[in-house]
Amino acid sequence: MHPLDVVKTRFQIQRCATDPNSYKSLGDSFRTIFRIEGLFGFYKGILPPILAETPKRAVKFFTFEQYKKLLGYVSLSPALTFAIAGLGSGLTEAIVVNPFEVVKVGLQANRNKFTEQPSTMSYARHIIKKEGLGLQGLNKGFTATLGRHGVFNMVYFGFYHNVKNIIPVNKDPTLEFLRKFGIGLLSGTIASVINIPFDVAKSRIQGPQPVPGEIKYKTCFKTMATVYREEGILALYKGLLPKIMRLGPGNDVFITYILPSLLF
């Protein structure tokens, strides 16, 4: 799924169609990256998400269960319980993944050939040395990451678990597979549509700034407002198609197959 993530980030950081480096369509982005950067261009920034995946998933599902237990002491409807527990798990998950995201986005934004770009560790050291570990350095875009993960998990878990309980289990294995797959795909798609403005803001803050040495995109909601004012409402949905193509099926496969095998 990583090539789709690279393409998504590239779309989110490009600012106008008149830019000679801007991609005209999803197909054009794939062709251009392959022609200029080679096959490995689609795998720029892949090490940070690989390193973050295990702790990220562990935190996501462990904290979801813990928040759900805590909310059991409050008289809330199951729908609200799942949504709030999802929100809590997303906010906690964001704390873990944000430094990895900063490094990943910076590497994905680099349009040089794969062999010419810095390694993951050297780029991380460069960020720490130049900008530090704080909200202007290895943790920049933190509030946007909180919004992205919090909103996604809130919608995903809330929708998935509630709809799954409404639609009855089917005894036929094929139909049961389609039931779970369909609910998961729809959950991921809806969550992606709702949270993508946070994702665009995150990419703008963590990616290269328009003028080197001058920070234009600083905070989450100010970045959203700037993008809306300068580029229009649709700019807040840049990269939506590759995001849905990546996150919808990706989360669906994990929830439907991998998670049950780990838990049971």
Image (cartoon, helix red, strand yellow):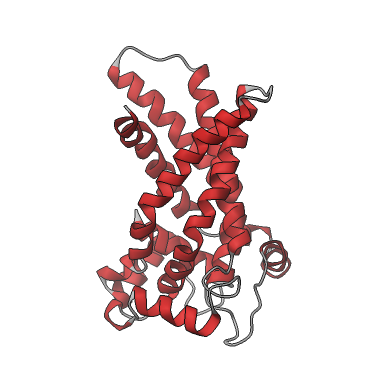
- In the rendered image, the residue lying farthest to the bottom is 213
In depth, the one of 174 and 53 nearer the eye is 53
Measuring from the top left, give residue 84's x and y in whole percent.
Answer: 62, 36
- Vertical arrangement, residue 249 with respect to residue 197, above or below: above
- Vertical arrangement, residue 128 with respect to residue 177, above or below: below
Q: Is residue 193 visible?
A: no
Residue 176 is left or right of residue 193, and the answer is left
Residue beneath the point at 35% across and 59% down:
51
Residue beneath the point at 50% across and 40% down:
63
Q: How many marks?
A: 0
Measuring from the top left, give residue 162's x and y in whole percent.
Answer: 55, 24
On-image quarter of the C terminus: top left
Q: Quadrant of residue 259?
A: top left
Measuring from the top left, give residue 92's x and y in whole percent.
Answer: 55, 49
In depth, the one of 151 and 11 nearer the eye is 151
Q: Is residue 217 visible?
A: yes
- Vertical arrangement, residue 12 with respect to residue 180, above or below: below
Residue beneath the point at 43% across and 50% down:
56
